[in-house]
Amino acid sequence: MSGLSPETFPPNGPRKVSATEECVGPMRLSQEPIQVLLVFAKEDSQSDAFWWACDRAGFRCNIARTPESAVECFLDKHHEIIIIDGRHSRYFEPEAVCRMIRATKPSENTVILAVVPQKPSDQEEPSVLPLLCAGFSRRFVENNSVSACYNELIQMEHGEVRCQFKLRACNSIFTALEHCQEAVEITSEDHIIQYVNPAFERMMGYHKGELIGKELTELPKSDKNRADLLDTINNCIKKGKEWQGIYYARKKSGDSIQQHVRITPVIGQGGKIRHFVAIKRPHIDNNNQLHKFNKEERYSGEHSHSECYSLRHRDRRKDSMDDRSVSSRSSDAPSLQNRRYSSVARIHSMTIEAPITKVINIINAAQESSPVTVAEALDRVLEILRTTELYSPQLASKEDDPHTSDLVGGLMSDGLRRLSGNEYVFCKNMSQSQLAIPVTLNDVPPNIAEMLNDEECWEFNILELEAATHKRPLTYLGLKICTSFGVCEFLNCSEATLRSWLQLIEASYHSSNSYHNSTHAADVLHATAYFLRKERVKSSLDQLDEVAALIAAAVHDVDHPGRTNSFLCNAGSELAILYNDTAVLESHHAALAFQLTVRDSKSNIFKNIDRTQFRTLRQAIIDMVLATEMTRHFEHVSKFVNSINKPMAAIEETSTSSMNSDCEGQANIRNSPENRLLIKRMLIKCADVANPCRPLELCIEWAGRISEEYFAQTDEEKRQGLPVVMPVFDRNTCSVPKSQISFIDYFITDMFDAWDAFATLPGLMEHLSENYKYWKTLDEMNCKSLRPPPPS
């Protein structure tokens, strides 16, 4: 068998080929013969045994000799079972191969088996946890008996594989729900929203991200229902009976909408109710006139009626469950005209909720009565509005500036894939960090304590703290700042837990990175705390927002590999594949932060807060970490300017009332949930790139560190034959002053002007101006280094 390719069967072919058939509820599953991939570096009796076991079971079998060919073959065939030889690590690491496969999208429905060596009877049985953590489904102790291998395969077929078939079928069911015209909402037994389909989003004006994970009781209610209607519904469905009736719901806009609702309890494990499925459609009254979505309804609460239907008698109401039926109770057969009204209403419900659509409709209406020149200008406006890059500025005026172009390309794109044919390139260990064991933190030494006394000052020197703490500034500074903001009290955790968490997070940063290390995290944490103490910021946010901001700052670059997103995408790294080349690092930072935190109770700072508060805090942290990703930089800044800066400036300029009402109007702008979100995003974005606003010596040091990291990336891109993302960052030719000037011009100035207008930061803006002049002076001297040459 040594000459067999991944496509080759045994000489006499498989003895039998049987398809699997099974039913999931009313749905029949039909599966072609199961495909098995054997990943064995060398042919031996064990690989032969599995090969002939596949033959006996009627399974199709491929063999791969290397990790790369295994991934390639799997992506081509999508095997149901993969068997990886884990007996001889000198050929390849089985856990690494498993992770490579698990990083691909098709592997979510694949069963992966590890073949492990037999241990002498006097040795302790090794734990299976490392294999499970690597992504294996189960293990098989080596046994070259064909019957033993056959039995293992059959057990997997009737166990895990069959379960995966059912999960695949669920995907098709969810696809149907996604395209269903009726609004569908699925909640847990505790009435926590777990799924809504696009029709529900269109009808109610919410995005699913605003709903999933929330309890129904958290959503605004319409005051048009009978006072006892909710109790009636709950009493009915808790008995396992279906409820059907008319119900008023409140849309995100605040308007009420009258709906025909059917709520069905779903019986699950143990015969208990596990989910509720609600199907909703706009209600049509007895005269077959469809209610307008955004107007007051003529019906009062007394018109709402409900009926309980036993699940056992559902078949008696087939007509009421027909997808085509959109008429009222008094009409058994809806007319074609009524169905057309319903379709038109659904079309309007799809478009009316989108603000950009409202703008386009207003412009279209204005064109009808406008002169030709105005109408043509509005045509150009519409053309711009219909593009997807509304917040990405054009670079026409800066095309001759390679520094700006490279910075934009390197920081605001996801890279160019340049993989030939069947190559599958992975960066080894790029996404993994070896965590150091947290060291017990003794009392803070006097010299460090003295440094930390100045942490509320913007000129605080983080690099001196880095040296004094032996590159562990995050733990020390984090303890001081978190104590100042009452983080332990808010989270109801001990200082020891917080200390352990800070040590864990700091150990997960790469000290070998010149820039993206724990000192950068500490620097961003310091800037975040400084901004949170500014009066206008403080009055806009609550304590949960503050705690979320401090945690997000500490973890925002955890396990950063010292390479950009573009590099990871071009290299085909495991992280880039896992996150589909989108916000790769930021997604990894946020996910890993929570994985590390909840892994051990000793460092789990969230263990004592309730579930609702944790969900809110977690969402805020994730949103802020993702906001540091640069591809949406201009979108975040533009929204902040247009939603906060400009309205507040307008109040200041036009208000003729008293000072108190003026402040009240500005507070209303700042404190809306949407604008608080924008403030938090802007806060962490500015904290993340505040280096040009630091005192000159700190600014110079940070510029040197980020340049060195970019130089190292360019060196590696050239070594690996990857696209060079930022060619100007070549250590032999780069002008550091030019790169700083471009960065400040393109990313920093407008953002900090907007943030200064909100938070009032005269000291920072003065530093920014002085630093910019410094880089300009060096550039005019044709100096490419961080400092001017010594006088001759």
Image: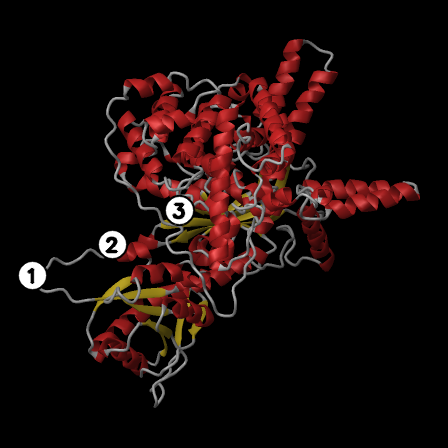
Colour pattern of the rendering: secondary structure
The residue at the point 20 percent across, 76 percent down is 144
At numbered mark 2, what does the secondary structure look like: helix, strand or loop?
A: helix
Sequence-wise, the earlier of marks 1 and 3 is 1
Residue 129 marker: 2
Which residue has dot 1 on it?
Answer: 122
Q: Is residue 312 above or below residue 544?
A: below
Front residue of this view, candidates 328 and 166: 166
Q: Which mark is residue 676?
A: none
Q: Which residue is mark 3?
A: 239
Q: Would you say residue 551 is visible in this rendering?
A: no
Name the residue at the right extreme.
371
- As shown in the figure, which amino acid type bears the numbered disc 1? Asp
Residue under the image location 55 percent in, 47 percent down: 261
- The mark lying in front, picked from 1 and 2, is 1
Q: Is residue 119 left or right of residue 537?
A: left
* Sequence-earlier tag: 2 or 3: 2
- When the figure is inspected, residue 83 is found, relative to residue 485, above or below; the finding is below
- Amino acid type, callout 2: Leu
* Closer to us: 390 or 688: 688
Please, which residue is most extreme toward the left here?
122
- Whole-angstrom CA distance, mark 1 to mark 3, is 57 Å
